Image (cartoon, rainbow, N blue to C red):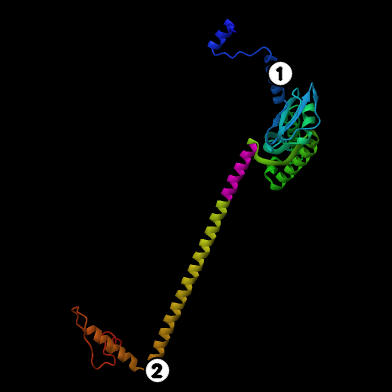
Amino acid sequence: MKDHPRSSERRNRGEVEIPAKVLPVVIILVGVLALASCSFKAVDVGHVGVASLFGNVREKPYPAGLHFPVNPMLKWVQFDARQKTHKETAAVPSQDQLLTDVDVSVQYRIDATKAPAILADTGTADQAVEVHLVPALRSLIREQGKTIKNAQDFFNEETQQRLQDSLFAGMEAFLAPKGIIVSDVLIRDIQLPAQLRQRIEEKKAEEQELARTEFEQQRKVVQAKAEREAADEQAKMRERLAEAQAYEITKINEAVSENPAYIKLQALEALKAISKDPAAKMYFMDGDAPMPLPLMNLSQ
C-alpha cells in the first residue's frame, strides 16, 4: 500500500502526523490538564487569600499554602497579613492656637479572619488603610492636640506618653471592627512652631548668659574671699613678727638690766668687726672710758 503524497511530504519536513482518531483524545487530555492546573491555588507566605465568584465573596479565607481542588472560575485577591508600619506627619493645634508638627508611626497588621469582609466592604489591604487608618489617625491626633494647653508641652515626657496612650486606645477601638489590628502607636519626632522655636532659642541664650554672669560673680566672690583670707594671714604674720621682735627687745632689755657686762661684751664684738673693716677709717677712742667704742661717750 502506497503512502499518500501529502503524508510523504510531511514526513520529509519532520512533521508528526496525528491520526484522525487520536486527535480528539489529545484535545480532551490537554483540556483536562489545563482544567487541573486551574484547580490549584498557592497563597504566598504571610498572606491570606480571598476568593470571589461572579461578585460574591467567599466567607472563608484561604491561609498561606497550596489549595486543591478549587473552582478554576474563582477570582483571587491576596492580603498581606504581616506586620506593617504607617508613618504620618500632622500639624497638631494646641490650646494656644499654635501648630506643632508631630511625626507618628502606627504599627498594624490585617486581621486575616476578616479579609473577606475587608474585600467586600472596602477593597484591598492598601485601600483599607487609606479609607480607615489614615483618616482616623489624623482626626485623633488633632483631637488629642486640643487637650494640650501650650505647644511647648509637647516636649514634656508625660504629655508624650499620654498622647501615645490615647492615640493607641482610639485607633485600636476604631480599627479592630474594620479588620485592622493596631499593635502600637509611637511618636517619632516633634517640630515646634518657628516663632516658638525662636523664643526658646532666645530664652536658652538668656539662661546661658545668666549662668555665665552668675559664674563670673561667684568666681569674683571666691577670689575676693581668697584675697581677704590672704590679707588676714599676712596681717597675722606681721603681728606675730612684731610680737617676736618685741619679745626679743624685751629679753635684750632684761638681759642688759640684769647683767651690765652684756653691753661691754657687745662693745668688744663691735670693735672686732670694726678692726676687720677694709675701709680706710680713723677712730679716736678713750681707753679710760667705761665704753671703749667710738661716739658712745660723747655725753661724757
Q: Position of residue 124 (x, y in %)?
A: 73, 28
Under mark 2, the amino acid is Glu
Task: Say which mark, if any, is on residue 258.
Answer: 2
How crowded pointer 2 is (Cα within 10 Å; few <14, some 14-19, many 20+) is rated as: few
Kind of residue sitting beneath label 1: Ile
Q: Which residue is mark 1?
A: 28
Q: Quadrant of the N terminus?
A: top right
- Magenta span covers which residues? 195-210
- Mark drawn on residue 87: none
SS at mark 1 in the image: helix
Residue at 24%, 86% in the rendered image: 272
Q: Nearer the viewer, residue 24 or 43?
A: 24
Q: Main secondary structure of the magenta part?
A: helix
Above or below: residue 240 compared with residue 81 = below
The mark nearer the N terminus, 1 or 2, is: 1
Q: CA distance from mark 1 to mark 2?
A: 155 Å
Q: Quadrant of the C terminus?
A: bottom left
Give the quadrant of residue 268: bottom left
Q: Residue at x 69, y 25 (%)?
A: 37
Q: Is any atom of residue 221 visible in this view?
A: yes
SS state under label 2: helix
Magenta includes 38?
no
Residue 172 sits above or below residue 225 on the image = above
Q: Position of residue 35 (x, y in %)?
A: 72, 22
Decide: marks 1, 2 in contact (CB < 8 A)? no
Relative image position of residue 39 (x, y in whole percent):
73, 26
**Front in this rendered view, residue 294 or 253:** 253
* 75 up-or-down from 224: above or below: above
In this rendering, which labeled residue sits more in front, label 1 or label 2?
1
Q: 285 and 104: which one is in front?
A: 104
